[in-house]
Amino acid sequence: QVQLVESGGGLVQAGGSLRLSCAASGRTFSSYAMGWFRQAPGKQREWVATITSGGSTSYADSVKGRFTISRDNAKNTVYLQMNSLKPEDTALYYCSARRGSTYDYWGQGTQVTVSS
């Protein structure tokens, strides 16, 4: 079992930055691929970024060049650095963990609100 707790959300003006953190329980964190997802009101949850256990990263086109995902296995934590934020980035952001092809563990989410 993996428990995930997100933090770092808040209210920021357009063009600003935030760094989200996701702290994971367990001693096998380094073996999981970690992902960030988001869900805006009235919309489906969408994938934002992934970092594999080996450190490879991938991003949704909507955030490429603005967001950076990273991990610190010594701290059992994954981060999402968000720069040049836009109002359309407003959403509840979740982190998730997977070993196989599906994301099996989810956090409760942290709210990000970007004002114009």
Image: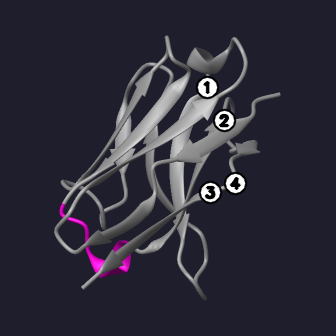
Q: Do callouts 4 and 3 mark residues in contact (Cβ within 8 Å)?
A: yes
Distance from Cα at disc 4 to Cα at disc 1: 18 Å
What is the number of the mark on residue 98?
2
Task: Give the residue type at disc 3.
Answer: Gly
Is label 1 or label 3 in front? 3
Residue 87 shown in magenta: yes
Residue of label 4: 108
Residue at image coords 83%, 28%:
1
Q: Nearer the viewer, residue 25 or 49?
A: 25
Residue at image coords 25%, 67%:
85
| Neighbourhood count class around disc 2 (C-alpha, 10 Å): few under 14, some 14–19, many 20 upward | some
Residue extending farthest right: 1
Q: Do callouts 2 and 1 mark residues in contact (Cβ within 8 Å)?
A: yes
Residue of label 3: 109
Distance from Cα at disc 2 to Cα at disc 4: 16 Å
Is label 2 or label 4 in front? 4
| Neighbourhood count class around disc 1 (C-alpha, 10 Å): few under 14, some 14–19, many 20 upward | some
Which span is picked out in magenta? 84-89
What is the number of the mark on residue 32?
1
Secondary structure at numbered mark 3: loop
Left or right side of 4 for 115: left
